[in-house]
């Protein structure tokens, strides 16, 4: 897709975890994927398929043995400095992810509007951005996902992670069409 390593923030990790097919989606990117320790340490929950049941805890721990996803920490004074700078405006997971991406030239996978705005406003080096919709679309095309499976995945993200691409997302129409099963 971009050919660069990718760091997933909490929003994208949660959306992919909600599908049960997140590892397959990340494998389809054919790049090394990372989650920073601030994201890995967060307790994440998705809604149950049964609305009468409590939320379910999910974790990236199931992704780690494959090697497709690794946990990463800031490892330089620059990354620590950027982390502190970004943390003034962002949650820890987004701030740490963005600091590492900025320093190492990685892409950032985030749906967080503020993180996207801040990353987009950085001068050289630019931080390439990915979104949940781009990752799911790439996976669907690359694997020739069956319409029923694609609908299931999109529905799971919407229902379990409570995410729908925003109106300005270029892939929103594709998402809505496939979510409806058209």
Image (cartoon, helix red, strand yellow):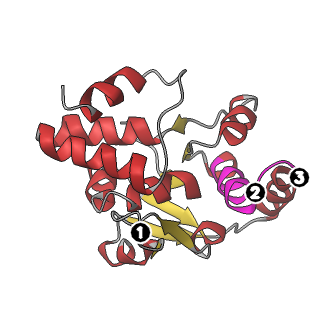
Quarter of the image where the C terminus is located: top left
Return the mark for residue 52: 1
Determine the CA span between mark 2 and mark 1: 30 Å
**Left or right side of 106 for 50:** left
**Mark 3 sits on what residue?**
88
Instruction: Tally the marks.
Output: 3
Residue drawn at the location 48% of the way across and 59% of the way down:
14
Work out which quarter of the rendered image holds the N terminus and state it: top left
Q: Which mark is residue 72?
A: none
Q: Which segment did they paint magenta?
A: 89-101
Q: Nearer the viewer, residue 120 or 131?
A: 131
Q: In the image, residue 156 lies at what x, y percent?
A: 34, 52
Q: Is residue 2 visible?
A: no
Asked if residue 103 lies left or right of residue 153, the reply is right
For the residues labelled 3 and 1, the Cα–Cα distance comes to 38 Å
Asked if residue 70 lies left or right of residue 26, the reply is right
- Residue 92 lies in the magenta stretch: yes
**Residue at image x 32%, y 46%?**
155
Q: Secondary structure at mark 3?
A: loop
Dot label at residue 91: 2
């Amino acid at each position: 897709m971009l050919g660069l390593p990718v760091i997933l923030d909490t929003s994208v990790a949660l959306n992919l975890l909600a599908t049960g097919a997140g590892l397959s989606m990340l494998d389809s990117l054919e790049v090394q994927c990372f989650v920073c320790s601030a994201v890995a340490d967060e307790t994440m929950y998705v809604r149950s398929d049964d609305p009468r049941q409590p939320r379910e805890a999910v974790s990236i721990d199931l992704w780690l043995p494959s090697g497709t996803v690794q946990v990463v920490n800031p490892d330089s004074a620059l990354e620590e400095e950027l982390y502190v700078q970004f943390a003034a405006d962002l949650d820890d997971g987004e701030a740490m992810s963005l600091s590492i991406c900025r320093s190492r030239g990685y892409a950032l996978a985030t749906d967080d509007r503020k993180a996207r705005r801040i990353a987009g406003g950085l001068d050289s080096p630019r931080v390439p951005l990915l979104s949940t919709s781009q990752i799911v679309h790439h996976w669907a095309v690359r694997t020739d996902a069956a319409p029923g499976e694609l609908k299931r995945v999109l529905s799971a993200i919407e229902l379990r992670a409570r995410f729908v691409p925003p109106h300005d997302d270029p892939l929103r129409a594709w998402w809505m069409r496939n979510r409806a099963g058209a």
